[in-house]
Amino acid sequence: MSTNRRDFLLKAGLGVGGIAASGFIPGVGFINAATAAELIDPLAPKQPHFPGKVKSVIWLHQNGAPSTLDLYDYKPELVKLAGQPVPASFMKGIKTSTQGGVNKLFYSNQRTFKQYGESGAWFSELLPNLAQHADKLAFIKSSVTVGATHDISILKLNTGDLNPGRPSLGAWVNYALGSLNPDLPSYVVLYNGEQEPSAGSVNWSSGFLPAVYQGTAFRPGDSPIIYLDRPELRSADQQRASLDLLKHLNRLGGERRPNDTELRARLESYELADRMQKAAPEAVDLSKESEATLKLYGIDDPTSESYGRVLLRARRLVERGVRFVQVVSGYPSNISDQERRSWDAHSDLDGNHGTQARMVDKPIAGLLQDLKTLGLLDSTLVVWASEFSRTPWGESGTGRDHNPWGYTQWIAGGGVKAGFTYGETDELGVQVADKDKGVDTYDLHATVLHLLGLDHLKTTFVNNGRSERPTVVYGKVVKELLA
Amino acid sequence: MKTKLAYLALTAIFAGSAYAATSAVDEDFMRNIEDTFKSADSAIGLKDAKTATADAKELEKLFAEVVDHYVKKGDAEEGVKLSEKSVALSKQIVVTVAAKDFDSAAAASAELGRACKSCHNVYKQD
């Protein structure tokens, strides 16, 4: 909503009748005049609970669960014991139900690790470009989650629950902070590859929050939003006149259904779509980016080209005030092997991770470098996240199974203790070494919200009479990760 | 008639005692804890002191039974420790809500959630 419209409403009606406007709305709770204005424009910017360190988040979901034992978590003991059974002492307290069973410990003879930066963080040969940014990252080497199928654990990664119905983290951020750019959706989902991510739109759903807070998926290519382009035979004036009529009729309908959030979301989306016809294609148009920038993101390499384009779009969106950009890794356009379409390496880990790592390494390194150069890294949080990781024991002779008991994720950007590592896994990388330092999805979400200036315990929404929050009934800010 | 009523009342009391003595820390019991906990957490968010206090007091009793369960089970040091911690956190919710300090109550509730999760990670099928 424009400032003028809000001013008008506040002064002419809701504002003058501030007390009158305050009151109880079923399903919403007690409101004051300010929130009444927000109900009219649910995406109006809102104040955080305390000054945030960052304005935007780029959430890099590594789809399919990379083996962080083969990327960041160097285990000399695993190298030594490769080919032997897993000692029973390492399996204490975990129950395996993974499809491949517990086989002998596996270590690829192609793997080499080196330390980088002043922090001395370990990186394998699979991530040579990202390794150059070691001192920008804060590693969480004690990540834990619930291990189920990919789709279910991905749902937990994004919404905190194993069942559909809860809002995704991006939707909570959108709800709590509103939009910084009225011409673009404030929660955008990006992916590379030919199809939407297989786990589906439930991962950017608004759940029980009003529908207006859900993520908007941008397709790869020149036309990011399906059916957004105005048909050639229709003039801009004709379209505006139609939209004005539609808006009038919808408002009449909306007045009779004040609690219909789907209708309110649709009203908002018509207007947003009209504005986005100009703003969105420009935001994702890379034609004016320099050759050097394209190269920085690996767009000159067929394997990293599609992911590089997506991350360059992410940077452009953040630059334009988009709050939450959720990037789901897909696959390069130059591969036909189905086994290499995600990080899910149950077999041929070297082939799979060779492709996937090459796809993301240069683009993520480029993103960090570009954000830094543009002065945006201080106001942006970049998160490397995955639904789980992979076991130190082998599967099919050359792959690894699913591991939710201990793995690595990282964060970088404003307010983050850069060049720091929190927690660790045991000597073989089976599970977290100290369970008290386990960082579950809820803790990661609480920490991300904290960096945005939001207290996860106070970010609440009343659904069916129950107060709900992003971290369900859990969550703890990992203060050690904060600068 | 009075004798019959007294007999029925006594039967009901004894039946109740027998139930209490045999009530186990089983799936239904834990589901009851989960429902009560979610209700308490929501009540804290809504600043509904009455419900939050009632739920937290109920949780205190239920977690005390979980402590007994793990003590009797034996070789369950972690279970005893975490259920005792849960009793203490339930008490903390009662105290902080009484002081109308809902921020501290919410923090205690989140900590209680973590304790539940930690315990379930160790004793998944207990």
Image (cartoon, helix red, strand yellow):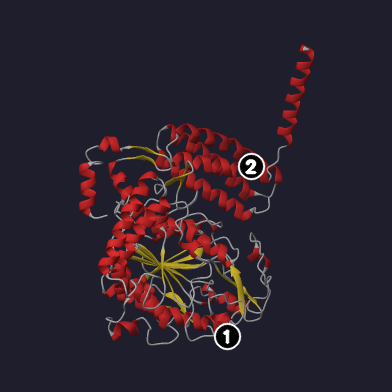
For marks 2 and 1, give the CA distance.
Answer: 49 Å
**Residue beneath the point at 48% across and 41% down:** A465
Q: Position of residue B40 (x, y in %)?
A: 51, 40
**Residue beneath the point at 29% across and 69% down:** A279
Can I make out residue A55 in this image? Answer: no
Q: Which residue is mark 2?
A: B66
Q: Secondary structure at mark 1?
A: loop
| Image position of A260 (left or right of A234) | right
| Nearer to the camera, A465 or A225 | A225
Can I make out residue A146 in this image? Answer: yes
Give the quarter of the image for residue A361.
Answer: bottom left
> What label sits on residue A109 in the rendered view?
1
Q: Is residue A412 above or below residue A50?
A: below
Q: Secondary structure at mark 2?
A: helix
Give the quarter of the image for residue B62.
Answer: top right
Mark 2: few/some/many CA within 10 Å (<14, 14-19, 20+): many
**Residue beneath the point at 21% across and 48% down:** A7
Give the quarter of the image for residue A204.
Answer: bottom left
**Residue beneath the point at 47% across and 51% down:** A208
* Amino acid carrying mark 1 in the image: Asn
* Amino acid carrying mark 2 in the image: Val
Mark 1: few/some/many CA within 10 Å (<14, 14-19, 20+): few
Write down the chain letter for disc 1.
A
